[in-house]
Image (cartoon, rainbow, N blue to C red):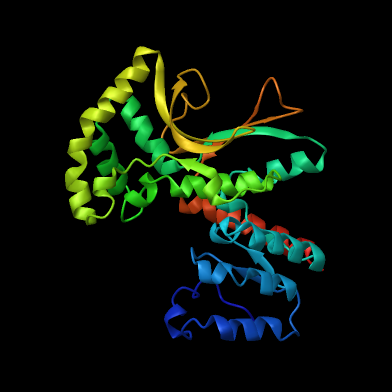
Amino acid sequence: AGGLDLGTALDTLGDGEPADLDALDDRLLAGGLERRIVVDATASEGVARRYVRWLEGGVGVVTPNKKANTLDLGYYRRLREAAGRREVSYHYETTVMAGLPVVFTVRDLLRSGDRIDAVEGVFSGTLAFLFNKLAEGAAFSEAVREAKALGLTEPDPRDDLTGEDVARKLLILARETGRDVERADLTVESLVPASLADVSVDAFMDALDGLDADWAARVAAAEAEGKRLAYVGQITEAGLSVGVRAVDTASPFGGSRGTDNVILIQSARYHDTPLVVQGPGAGPDVTAAGLLADLVKAAELMP
């Protein structure tokens, strides 16, 4: 009842009860508590599917979990309707590009009467690092192994290389702009050959050298045109796509470094010169800061 002491909270985690979502529901929805907010820092679809019930019960939700906003369109609409009808907070800024103000920016443009015509960006810090290393002359295998060694990839790097994480971010943004789209509406280029999709992680890592020649040829072809490769997601009137593109070295994508994410928003207001948001799109510090900002905002807005 008195909250948790921040100095000892982590030390006492082992003394708690095993997670029981049904018991959590009962406590949250029983009433008697003011400004109830759940912070879901999991990647669980099971937890995400409880959001509608929580919102309809007057419980706010703050989350970096991408699953809820990328489930079927019917569930997404129920989420928005429940939050709007009950006037409770549902914040998910950190689902796209960590702590960078992307969802907030898109939402405010629309609220102010703008019309978003196109969005394109480098949405993965992992893949940004990979393609920046390729531009510096590294072999594909070397870049993937270095990213894994630095902890920039998932334990299985294929979870990043398939492009599905970027696809989820793009789907969230597309729906945020008012487009009624499903995952099946996205065209996604995977960097994982079909022959390596189901082998063990160790076997995949050992097989990376065999991919170097093809990637070296793609890099050389881009450089011959004065360009470089980047893994870009696009939302246009023609549809939604995620994949490798040759970009001008003088463009915001071509000038990125390290794990930086870059997003360009073209709208009726920002037509000739797109609005650019750039910065670290991954990492525990920036994600935690964005999550905390959402939590404070949620608490302030709830009655």
Q: Residue at x 70, y 64 (%)?
A: 78
The percent coordinates of residue 225 (x first, y second) are 39, 13
Q: Residue at x 40, y 26 (%)?
A: 229
Q: In which quadrant of the rendered image does the C terminus lie?
A: bottom right
The percent coordinates of residue 257 (x first, y second) are 43, 31
Horizontally, is 283 left or right of 208 in the view? right
* Of residues 147 and 176, the one drawn nearer to the viewer in this rendering: 176
The percent coordinates of residue 63 (x first, y second) are 59, 61
Residue 271, by quadrant, is: top right
The percent coordinates of residue 27 (x first, y second) are 65, 85
Q: How many marks?
A: 0
Q: In which quadrant of the rendered image does the N terminus lie?
A: bottom right
Q: Examine the rendering and report whether any part of residue 252 can be seen.
A: yes
Q: Residue at x 18, y 37 (%)?
A: 210
Q: Residue at x 62, y 45 (%)?
A: 173
* Of residues 124 and 241, the one drawn nearer to the viewer in this rendering: 241
Asked if residue 210 is positioned above or below residue 254 in the image, the reply reads: below
Q: Examine the rendering and report whether any part of residue 277 can be seen.
A: no
Residue 276, by quadrant, is: top right
Horizontally, is 174 left or right of 86 in the view? left
